[in-house]
Amino acid sequence: MAGEITLKSFPFDSMDVLNSESSQMEPDRLYEAKIFREYFKKFLSNGVYFGTYKNYGENSMKVTADGGLNIKVAKGAGLIEGADFENESDKLFTLERPVSGNRVDRVVVKFDTTLATRATQLYIKQGTGTTPSELQRDENIYEICLAEVTVKSTTNITADDVVDKRLNNTLCGIVNSLITVDGEELYQKFQDYIDSVTNNLVRKDEENVTISGVFKDKIGGTSENNFTDEYKSKLDGISNGANKTTINNTLTSNSTTEALSAAMGKKLNDEKQNLIKSGTDIPIGGNNGDIYIQYFNE
């Protein structure tokens, strides 16, 4: 039997063990922040949180014009490369007016793991003319763009100058689960299962139900010989919305809707057959249509 292989996994409780190199007792389970970020990256995408968290909703991290050259970034939260960030109060920025023409700036959240920073930062990334600056995304820095703002040399910033980019999955995006299920395939499997069940059931919402073939109850009674009372009760249990079949096990009913059981049908058939008898005695009893031949011994 092959030996056990230890897989990369976390977290586990830490305990102090002797470090053979330092001769000191040290914890044997230490986890860097990167390990936790990598964990969240497995099932949460980059972007801004929408939803009920602190009632941020669809206004989470939304950028709007705020008079003059000012813009406002609303309260909100998000996730970048597994790292959580939150803007707990509205933030105001005053953009720099270009000397001439127009300039497109980007409102950016930057995730920075460099030793000097180790944080997420909200800032304005100036563009060159009408071309916005590229977002930096490398080993240490990952930027998302909340909005692009056109800053003009002659007029102030208006609502039309602010273009929301939060829904753009390439530039920002809304935080979503990365765990997906093929809905169409799942639905088809469920539908196939339902079909396999309903094919053998009497639908209670159908106006007409046709039952054919030979039915058999659990103790062997069939529609070809004798139904038990238990099986008859099952037939009686069909909802009123469907055609109801009642099995009559007596010969005294005058109903035009009840059906004779197989056993009673056979009995009725036997009793209704005309008889041919013979003998030396005077005939007694019998039914109309019976034939009796009397003979005498000499």
Image (spheres, helix red, strand yellow):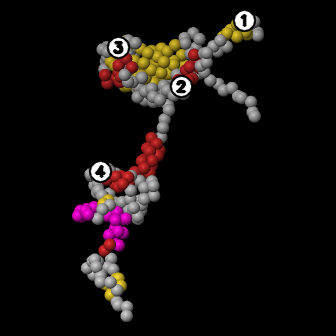
Residue 21 location (% of width, % of height): 76, 9
Q: Earlier in the sequence, mark 1 or mark 2?
A: 1
Which residue was labeled with disc 4?
239
Q: Earlier in the sequence, mark 4 or mark 1?
A: 1
Which residue was labeled with disc 2?
41
* Start-end of magenta stretch: 252-270
Q: Residue at x 34, y 86 (%)?
A: 280
Q: Earlier in the sequence, mark 2 or mark 3?
A: 2
Disc 2 secondary structure class: helix
Q: Which mark is residue 24?
A: 1
Q: Say which quarter of the image contains residue 61.
A: top left
Which residue was labeled with disc 3?
70
* Of labels 3 and 4, the one closer to you: 4
Q: Say which quarter of the image contains residue 22.
A: top right
Q: Does 256 appear above or below 158? A: below
In the rendered view, does 165 fall on the left or right side of 244? right
